[in-house]
Image (cartoon, grey):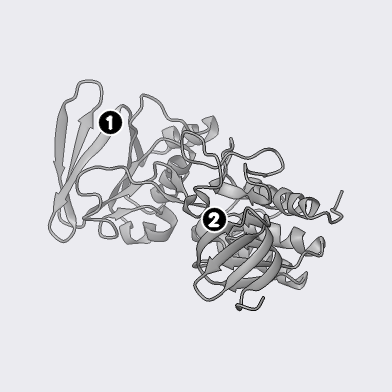
Amino acid sequence: MSDGTISKDLVIVGGGPAGLSAAIYASRSLLDAVTLEREALGGQVILTSEIDNYPGVPHADGFSLVDAMRAQAEDLGATIVMDPVDSVERDEATGRFRVSAASASYDAAAVIVAAGATPRHAGFEGEERFAGHGVSYCATCDGMFYRGKHVFVVGGGNSAAEEALFLARLASRVTMVVRKDHLRAQAAIVRELEENERVEILLSTSVVALDGGELPSRVTLRDNVTGETRTLDYDEGSFGVFVLVGRVPETGLVAGLVETDDAGYVVTDDRMATATPGLFVAGDVRSKALRQIVTAAADGAVAATSAASYLGLPVEG
């Protein structure tokens, strides 16, 4: 285009498993597409040390799995650019999209948003103060810093349970702090936790405050049934808190173009289509029952074939 805007059939926003899967299927559908990633290909997946539930690739680490996805996409002709996207807009007159990134702007007939989600904060006093210095949101990233120490895991879902089991390999003791009166994790994972002698599970309990100097030395817990609180004192830096209470979907780019559910995830149909024609969503940003690598990859495949069909091109059957 005359103003320097790059014209594409499809722009894919996000280079995680959903975005890379979409890039693979877009290439196979002969779409002129570009995949834009803000920080690092793979997103949260590259922080995972071991993946044992992706079919056909047992005991893979996240970085290697994502690198294989990238290589496959590029071998098929996909274009992947490291460039953060600032906005996604739709021209109502033409039905085309303008995707503005830091280094370039794109004019596209269709867009797939696979921007993922970021860790949700628990909201206790001192959480922001000690973030990165006693409070972490990724056990596989920061677990080594707490080798031989006591760690608290805030959360009761699958992610929290899996991370607690990982931390139990490193820490001297793991205390799960669960707000509800039960764990929401899968039964098999709960059984592993209950059988692990390093793991303690505190139900109906919340962390209400952290305090200390440069590093935390005191944690205050509340019994959510009685309302009573108790404070535990430690040597500074001898414990840590891992907050694993879910994620916040990255929907800001398309906030005015999509419908969201009560948790803020984008509502789509089974073709990954949103309320806006030509705009598709895939992966963790989408409202669905299960958020795993395999479902993200499936979402990306469906979104890309749906985009090709939207553009009137033949798709794989």
- The answer to whether residue 59 of the structure is visible from this angle is no
Report the residue marked by disc 2. 115
Q: Quadrant of residue 10?
A: bottom right
In which image quadrant can residue 133 be found? bottom left
Judged left or right of residue 301, residue 137 is: left
Q: Residue at x 55, y 39 (%)?
A: 259
Name the residue tied to disc 1: 205
Q: Are marks 1 and 2 in contact (CB under 8 Å)?
A: no
Question: For the residue labelled by badge 2, is the local secondary structure a helix, a strand or a loop?
Answer: loop
Tell me which numbered mark, 1 or 2, is placed earlier along the sequence: 2
Residue at (70% x, 38% y) in the render = 270
**Above or below for 149 versus 63:** above
Q: Nearer the viewer, residue 107 or 280?
A: 107
* Residue 97: quadrant of the picture: bottom right
Q: Nearer the viewer, residue 196 or 60?
A: 60
Q: Amino acid at mark 1?
A: Thr
Foreground residue among 135 and 29: 29
Instruction: In the rendered structure, find residue 35 and report the number of the disc placed on it.
Output: none
**Cα distance in 3D space between marks 1 and 2:** 33 Å
Residue sitting at 25 percent across and 38 percent down?
A: 207
At mark 1, the secondary structure is strand
Q: Point out residue 29 in the picture as x, y percentages from the top left corner.
A: 81, 60
Res. 103 visible in picture: yes
Left or right relative to 149: residue 254: right
Residue 107 place in picture, x, y as percent: 64, 66
Q: How many neighbours does mark 1 have within 10 angstroms: few (below 14), some (14-19), or many (20 or more)?
A: many
Q: At 52% from the left edge and 67% from the top edge, which residue is drawn?
A: 40
Q: Position of residue 67 (x, y in %)?
A: 63, 67
User: The disc labelled 2 sits on which kind of residue?
Assistant: Ala
